C-alpha cells in the first residue's frame, strides 16, 4: 500500500495514471487541483487529459495525462530514450546533446547534463554534469573508455573519484552533488541537492560497461521541480504516450533531437580534453 500525503480535506478520489501507474489524488470531485501521492500539487491542463481526473465515475478507465510527468527517465542501449512525459524513442544521431537541464532562479541553481552519442548505433559514450550555480563552474564526467568518474572544481584540475563510500563531490553555496551508497565500480548513484533542501532534487544512477557504452536512469524526487526541467529527458511533442494496451503494437519511434544538439566541443561544454579526444576517436 501507499501512504498518501495531504493537508486539509481528505482526498475524495485516488487514481493511477493509466500509462505511468503513478498515484494521484483529487480533493474535490468535479474540480481541481490534482495532487501527487506526496500531497504536492501537479499542474495539469484539463485539455491535455484524455479523461477528466476529477470525475469519479466507477468503471471508467484511468486518466492518462500528457502533462503528467513521470519521475523516472532512462537512456539505455543504442540509445533508447524514455522521457519524463511518457515518451519512448530511439535516437538516430551522433554528437553531443543537452540531456537534462535544471534551472531555478532563486536561489540560483543551474545544472546541465550533456550526453555524447557515437558509433554506428549511437551508443552513449560520455556523460558530463556541469554546475554553474556558483561564481565558478564545476564539472563531473565519465566516459565508456575507463568508466571512471572525474571531477573538476575551481582549481581547473581534474581529479578521479576513487571512493566507493558516500561523499560530497562538488559543492557551492546554493547546490551540491553527492555520491551516495556503497556501489560497484561500474555503478554509481549521484544525488543533486539545493543547499537548503533536505531531500535531493534528482538522483542519477549510471551504469557503465567499459569499452562499450553507458546506461543511465534519472529519478526526480518531487513533482514540484518538474517545471524547472528541460532537455531530452523532459520530452517533447510527437513522442508522447506510446501504446500501452495489450492489443497495441509497439511502434518504433525515432528522432534526431536536433533541438537539443549542441555544437560546442566537449571541452567547451566543460569536459576534459582527454575525454574529448576519446569521444572524437
Image (cartoon, grey):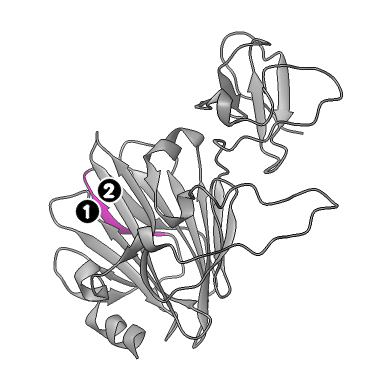
Q: Are marks 2 and 1 in contact (CB under 8 Å)?
A: yes
Q: Residue at x 56, y 50 (%)?
A: 72
* Secondary structure type for disc 1: loop
Residue in the picture at 85% in, 20% down? 58
Q: Hey, which quadrant is residue 94 in on the image?
A: bottom left
* Residue 65 x/y as whole percent: 62, 34
Which residue is found at the position 32% from the left and 36% from the top? 196
Q: In the image shown, does 259 or 272 lie closer to the viewer? A: 259
Q: Which residues are magenta?
A: 167-173
Crowd class of label 1 (few under 14; some 14 to 19; many from 20; radius 10 Å): some
Give the x, y percent position of residue 11: 67, 15
In this view of the protein, which residue sits in the foreground, 171 or 46? Answer: 46
Q: Which residue is mark 1?
A: 132
The N terminus lies in which quarter of the figure? top right
Whether residue 84 is in magenta: the answer is no
Q: Which mark is residue 209?
A: none
Tell which circle, 2 or 1, labels the residue nearer the N-terminal end. Answer: 2
The image position of residue 234, as x and y in percent, is 46, 49
Residue 172 covered by magenta stretch: yes
Q: Main secondary structure of the magenta part?
A: strand
Give percent across and percent down for residue 113.
36, 60
Q: Against 193, is 144 above or below?
A: below
Q: Is residue 117 above or below residue 66?
A: below
On the question of residue 70 being in view, the answer is yes
Residue 110, numbered label: 2
Question: SS at mark 2?
Answer: strand
Amino acid at each position: 500500500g501507499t501512504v498518501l500525503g495531504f493537508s486539509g480535506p481528505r482526498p475524495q478520489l485516488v487514481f493511477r495514471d493509466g500509462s505511468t501507474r503513478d498515484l494521484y489524488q483529487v480533493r474535490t470531485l468535479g474540480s481541481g487541483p490534482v495532487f501527487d501521492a506526496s500531497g504536492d500539487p501537479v499542474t495539469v491542463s484539463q485539455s491535455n487529459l484524455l479523461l477528466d481526473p476529477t470525475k469519479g465515475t466507477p468503471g471508467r478507465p484511468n486518466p492518462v495525462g500528457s502533462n503528467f510527468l513521470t519521475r523516472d527517465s532512462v537512456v539505455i542501449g543504442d540509445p533508447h530514450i524514455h522521457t519524463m512525459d511518457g515518451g519512448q524513442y530511439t535516437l538516430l544521431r551522433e554528437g553531443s546533446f543537452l540531456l537534462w537541464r535544471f534551472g531555478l532562479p532563486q536561489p540560483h541553481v543551474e545544472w546541465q547534463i550533456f550526453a555524447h552519442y557515437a558509433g554506428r548505433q549511437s551508443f552513449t559514450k560520455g556523460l558530463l554534469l556541469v554546475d554553474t550555480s556558483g561564481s565558478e563552474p564545476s564539472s563531473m564526467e565519465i566516459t565508456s573508455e575507463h568508466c571512471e568518474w572525474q571531477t573538476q572544481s575551481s582549481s581547473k584540475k581534474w581529479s578521479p573519484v576513487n571512493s566507493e563510500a558516500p561523499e560530497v563531490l562538488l559543492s557551492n553555496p546554493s547546490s551540491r552533488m553527492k555520491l551516495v551508497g556503497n556501489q560497484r565500480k561500474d555503478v554509481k548513484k549521484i544525488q543533486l541537492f539545493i543547499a537548503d533542501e533536505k531531500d535531493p532534487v534528482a538522483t542519477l544512477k549510471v551504469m557503465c560497461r567499459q569499452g562499450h557504452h553507458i546506461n543511465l536512469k534519472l529519478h526526480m524526487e518531487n513533482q514540484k521541480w518538474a517545471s524547472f526541467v528541460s532537455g531530452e529527458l523532459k520530452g517533447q511533442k510527437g513522442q508522447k504516450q506510446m501504446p500501452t494496451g495489450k492489443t497495441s503494437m509497439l511502434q518504433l519511434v525515432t528522432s534526431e533531437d536536433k533541438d537539443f544538439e549542441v555544437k560546442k566541443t566537449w571541452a567547451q561544454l566543460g569536459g576534459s580534453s582527454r575525454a574529448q579526444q576519446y569521444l572524437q576517436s
